[in-house]
Image: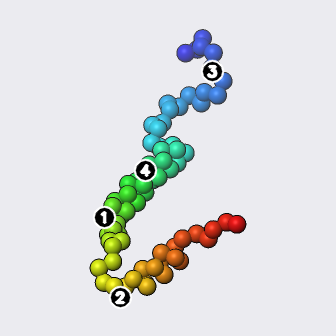
Amino acid sequence: MAGRKPIPGDSGTPPSAWWRHPIMWMVVGGPAVVVVAGIVTAVIATRGADPVLDTRVADQAAVPAVQARNHAATPPRQP
């Protein structure tokens, strides 16, 4: 090694493994957390989905309430 020129920036120590660098955990961990959160959100959405309501009214006493609900849910008309 006496005749070999040193490489600039080389400290002479062997490189460490990729998992020993904290910045690598940020690069890999950030997207991994987002993927896991998306899967959890999808599971919650499918398991806790609200049942579909029947739009037909079986009881005539409920007609005014259904009409009021539908009226409140419609957006106002633009002039």
Q: In screen coordinates, is 52 left or right of 72?
A: left
Of the numbered discs 4 and 1, the one sitting upstream in the chain is 4
- Could you tell me the amino acid type at mark 4? Val
Residue that extends furthest to the bottom in the rendered view of this protein: 61
For disc 4, the neighbor class at 10 Å (few under 14, some 14 to 19, many from 20) is few
Instruction: For marks 2 and 4, give the CA distance.
Output: 48 Å
Which residue occupies the foreground of this view, 15 or 5?
Answer: 15
For disc 3, the neighbor class at 10 Å (few under 14, some 14 to 19, many from 20) is few
For disc 2, the neighbor class at 10 Å (few under 14, some 14 to 19, many from 20) is few
- Residue 15 visible here: yes
Of the numbered discs 1 and 3, the one sitting upstream in the chain is 3
| Residue 35 disc label | 4
Instruction: For marks 4 and 1, give the CA distance.
Output: 18 Å
| Residue 61 disc label | 2
Which residue occupies the foreground of this view, 60 or 72?
Answer: 60
To which residue does mark 1 refer?
Answer: 47
Residue that extends furthest to the top in the rendered view of this protein: 3
Helix, strand or loop status at disc 4: helix
- Residue 25 visible here: no
Q: In screen coordinates, is 17 left or right of 44?
A: right
**Picture coordinates of residue 31, whole percent (x, y):** 48, 47
**Picture coordinates of residue 3, whole percent (x, y):** 60, 11
Q: Quadrant of the C terminus?
A: bottom right
In which quarter of the view is residue 56 placed?
A: bottom left
Residue that extends furthest to the front in the rendered view of this protein: 60
Q: Quadrant of the N terminus?
A: top right
